[in-house]
Image (cartoon, helix red, strand yellow):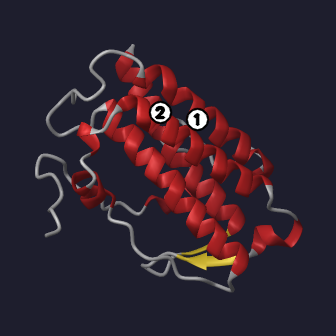
Amino acid sequence: MTERADPTITPDTKDWTWVLERECPECGFDASAFAREQVGAMIRANAAGWSPLLAAGDVARRPEPDVWSALEYACHVRDGFRIYDQRLELMLTQDGPRYPNWDQDATAVEDRYGGQDPGVVTDELRRAGLDLADRFDSVAGAQWERTGFRSDGAEFTVESFARYFIHDPVHHLREVADRAR
């Protein structure tokens, strides 16, 4: 039986593709403020930034019942790295692939994000980040213009995919780090 999403968490149903057009008012991320070739380095820095946060005290404790804990956010970022690595591979090896939907809220419940071992999550997040960073680092020339489609039909080039994707881990690391201060 598939578990339903956590009823204390309001599912995020926003279409975050707007981050490609304007700065995020919550975290200040600007998708136009860096060269596309920097995405691999940005992923590596992000993956490294989670280690001290996950080594802190009660990382599984939610700051509010309806807000994920640092551990839950780290699991989400780890899984995002994995999902986007698979999607990027599809974009680089197939013509116009359509990605399967990923229900991040259902995954958090099914995989029991809040009960995972922070040390294991730290290692897995780092590894998944390095894998994705390496794949982005391998992109060259016309590959940046290859396309792929989200399950709702949104079209991305590898470049817009990179700029769209990197906002998520940057945003979450900032909000978790800000709460830890």
Question: Which image quarter is the N terminus in?
Answer: bottom left
Q: Where is mark 2, residue-wise?
A: 122
Question: Which one is nearer the viewer's eye here, 36 or 26?
Answer: 36
Labelled pair 1, 2 in contact (Cβ < 8 Å)? no
Circle 1 residues within 10 Å: few <14, some 14–19, many ≥20: many
Q: Where is mark 1, residue-wise?
A: 46
Q: Say whether residue 114 is visible.
A: yes
Q: Say whether residue 12 is visible.
A: no
In percent of width and height, residue 80 lies at: 47, 53
Could you tell me the amino acid type at mark 1?
A: Asn
Dot 1 falls on a residue whose secondary structure is helix
Please, is residue 105 above or below residue 115 in the view?
below
Relative to 85, is 144 on the left or the right? right
Res 5 → quadrant: bottom left
Relative to 52, is 130 on the left or the right? right
Relative to 115, is 28 on the left or the right? right
Question: Which image quarter is the C terminus in?
Answer: top left
Identify which residue is drawn at 12% across, 46% down. 8
Task: Find the residue positioned furthest to the right.
Answer: 141
In percent of width and height, residue 32 lies at: 69, 49
Could you tell me the amino acid type at mark 2?
A: Thr
Res 177 → quadrant: top left
Dot 2 falls on a residue whose secondary structure is helix
